[in-house]
Image (spheres, helix red, strand yellow):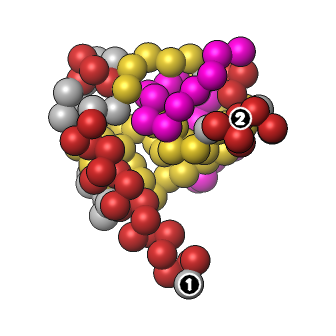
Amino acid sequence: MPDYSPWDVIKVPFPYTDRPVRERRPAVVVAADGLQQEHGLLWVLMITSAANPGWPGDVAVSDLAIAGLPADSVVRTAKIATIDAREAERIGRLPAGDRALAARALNAALAPAMG
């Protein structure tokens, strides 16, 4: 199994919250390292089409070629999932400038819960 790193863009079976299906779609890794080594898991954020209605915290992907994405996309920081690393396939990396924006949005969403 390949080792994944934060900010890898991967394709995984992402679970939906509103229906009992999983669709193979892009996501960005936000936690791997020990989580993957000890449990075989990754924490990921959904990547979705930029044509979809926007949500607070969405971050536009600035370079599709680096990210390995075929169409204008956003990181949907409100949709985080735990994925089995064995089901992931690396397709690119989130561009460096987008990482800080995604981290800031994720931290803002988590801060109230973390006290």
Viewer-nearest residue: 69 or 22: 69
Residue at 43% x, 65% y is 107
Say whether residue 101 is left or right of residue 32: left
Residue to which mark 2 is pinned? 36
> Magenta segment, which residues?
1-20
Say whether residue 80 is left or right of residue 53: right
**Residue 16 on the magenta segment:** yes
Q: Earlier in the sequence, mark 1 or mark 2?
A: 2
- Magenta: main secondary structure equals loop
x and y percentages locating residue 55 in the rendered image: 31, 59
x and y percentages locating residue 57 in the rendered image: 32, 60
Residue at 58% x, 44% y is 31
Say whether residue 79 is left or right of residue 51: right
Q: Amino acid at mark 1?
A: Gly
- Looking at the image, can residue 7 be seen? yes
Figure check: 74 above or below 57: above
Q: Which image quadrant for residue 60?
A: top left
**Residue 72 on the magenta segment:** no
Residue at 71% x, 15% y is 1
Q: Amino acid at mark 2?
A: Gln
Say whether residue 36 is left or right of residue 31: right
* Tag of residue 106: none
* Tag of residue 115: 1
**Whole-Å distance between the Cαs marked 1 and 2?**
26 Å
Q: Residues within 10 Å of mark 1 (few under 14, many from 20)?
A: few
x and y percentages locating residue 38 in the rendered image: 81, 38
Figure check: 24 above or below 60: above
